[in-house]
Image: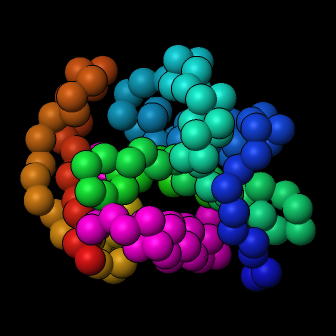
Amino acid sequence: MALTFRNAMSSERDEVERVLRAAFTPYVRALGRELSAAGYARLPAELERGDIYVALEADRVVGVVRTERRDDGLFIDQIGVDPTRQGAGVGSWLLGRIEEVARLSGARGMSLYTAEMMEHLVRLYRKHGFEIIHRGPPDHGLDAHTRVHMVKSF
C-alpha cells in the first residue's frame, strides 16, 4: 500500500465528499438515520482552513480525516475510508498521520467520539492509544444511540 498524506485541496471537495458518504452511509443507517446534505455544507470552509486531510493512492482519494482545533488539542470529527480500501489498514495509517499533525502543531492530545454500537471502531481507537472518558447520548439529538468519547494525551 503506497499512500500519500496531505491537506486536502479545495478542488478535491467532490472526492472528499464521495469518500465520506461511501464510508458513513452504513454507519448512519445503523443508527437509524440517513445522511443529510447539511453534514457536508461545512466542507468548503473546512477545506479553506486546512482542517481536512486525505490519503491518496495513485492520486485517488481513498481516505479522509476531518479535524477541528479545540483548546489545546485536535478533535477528529470524521475518519472515512473508501469501502474498497476498508480493512486494509488505511484507517490505522490515517490515525498515525493525523497524530503527527497534532504533535507538530503543539497539540497536547486528540479527541473523538463514535457510536458505542460500532465496537470495531472503539477497539481501533483503543489500539491507537485512545482512552474512553465518557459514554452518553449524542449532543445533536438525532438518535438515541450512546456515544463513546475518547481522548489520547501526549
Residue 128: percent from the left, percent from the top?
36, 78
- In which quarter of the view is residue 143 placed? top left
Residue 81: percent from the left, percent from the top?
62, 57
Q: In the rendered view, does 90 fall on the left or right side of 84?
A: left
139 and 53: which one is in front? 53
Instruction: Please name the residue shown 75% across and 75% down the image.
Output: 3
Residue 89: percent from the left, percent from the top?
59, 76
Q: In the rendered view, does 20 fall on the left or right side of 101?
A: right
For residue 79, above or below residue 35: below
131 and 145: which one is in front? 131
- In which quarter of the view is residue 86 placed? bottom right
Question: Farthest residue in the right direction?
Answer: 58
Instruction: Please name the residue shown 31% across and 47% down the image.
Output: 70
- In which quarter of the view is residue 139 placed? top left
Look at the image and give the residue range highlighted in magenta. Answer: 86-115
Question: Can residue 109 be seen?
Answer: yes
